[in-house]
Image: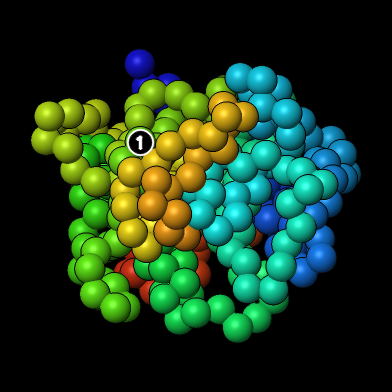
Amino acid sequence: MVQIKTREQIAKMREAGLVVAAIHAATREAAVPGATTKDLDQVARKVLAEHNAKPNFLGYGGFPATICTSVNEVVVHGIPSDDVVLKDGDVISIDCGAIIDGWHGDAAYTAFVGSGHAPELVELSRVTEESMWAGIAAMKQGNRLVDVSRAIETYIRRQPKPGGGRYGIIEDYGGHGIGTEMHMDPHLLNYVDRRRGKGPKLVPGFCLAIEPMVSLGTPKTEVLEDDWTVVTTDGTWSSHWEHSVALTEEGPLVLTSPDGGKGKLAELGITAAPDPLG
């Protein structure tokens, strides 16, 4: 069952989304050479406390931290640790969430640590982020879930990969519904699988966490012995971008973007829904 939200509930999710945006800003600033991923987790905890918000990752299925810190070949669910020290040239994806009055926000971004990153890594992150926005732009009344998947996959497949070959669209993980829980129906693939059909129709009140994960090589992953850390099977580096998005009568509202998605959606010829928080 897909949970359809009222305007008032979407406003609460917007509150949670703005806390997530604040965590992103603080952790991005702190992701410098010499910092540990545990340091970044502490930064996120501080932001949550300042906003009287609860973490939705900590304790989820036994996850031991407030955020996921996924470095280089780690795709998702990296556990913050004092042993993981960021180095110049690293790429880190930070995934985090917040709860306000029982309503969830969830988003992720990829950041470059230090300088001197290879052009193919910069392009990988750009392609992943832009494919997320292509998926957000497909959140229109009358579309179906598969249209979001198709928009993400189509954008990625149309981008030439430096050095040739194709980007790996991670197969085992994708987006999801979000609301009174962090992960809810429906599951959102980042590619089209015709065996799954078209999926539900998108209507006002439909909320999705749209999150493409893309590697420079394989779409295949494996989970390490800690039962959380997901890495590419060929060791190629990856990127992960995510926003929580609500579809309203006035269009999409990017709940975890500081401006509600207004600026980026305007570039795509789409008018973002008004911010319910003013």
Does residue 182 sit above or below 263 in this rendering?
above
**Residue at figure coordinates x 77%, y 69% from the top left:** 33
**Picture quadrant where residue 200 is located:** top left
Quarter of the figure that contains the N terminus = top left
Residue named by callout 1: 172
One can see residue 247 in this view = no
Q: Pinpoint residue 15: horizontal percent, then vertical percent.
A: 68, 42
Q: Pinpoint residue 148: horizontal percent, then vertical percent.
A: 28, 47
Does residue 1 sit above or below 64 in this rendering?
above
> Considering the numbered disc 1 on the image, is that residue within a helix, a strand or a loop?
loop
- Crowdedness near tag 1: few (<14), some (14–19) or many (≥20) residues, C-alpha within 10 Å: few
The number of callouts visible is 1
Q: Nearer the viewer, residue 275 or 53?
A: 53
Q: Is residue 142 left or right of residue 261?
A: left
Does residue 54 sit above or below 140 in this rendering?
above
Q: Is residue 200 left or right of residue 182?
A: left
Amino acid on which the number 1 mark rests in the picture: Asp
One can see residue 172 in this view = yes
**Residue at figure coordinates x 24%, y 64% from the top left:** 166
Q: Is residue 162 left or right of residue 74?
A: left
Q: Pinpoint residue 210: horizontal percent, then vertical percent.
A: 42, 45
Q: Nearer the viewer, residue 16 or 196?
A: 196
Colour mapping used in the image: rainbow
Q: Nearer the viewer, residue 230 or 235?
A: 235
Q: Nearer the viewer, residue 18 or 278?
A: 18
Q: Pinpoint residue 188: horizontal percent, then vertical percent.
A: 33, 36
**Residue at figure coordinates x 21%, y 59% from the top left:** 154
**Residue at figure coordinates x 68%, y 56% from the top left:** 24
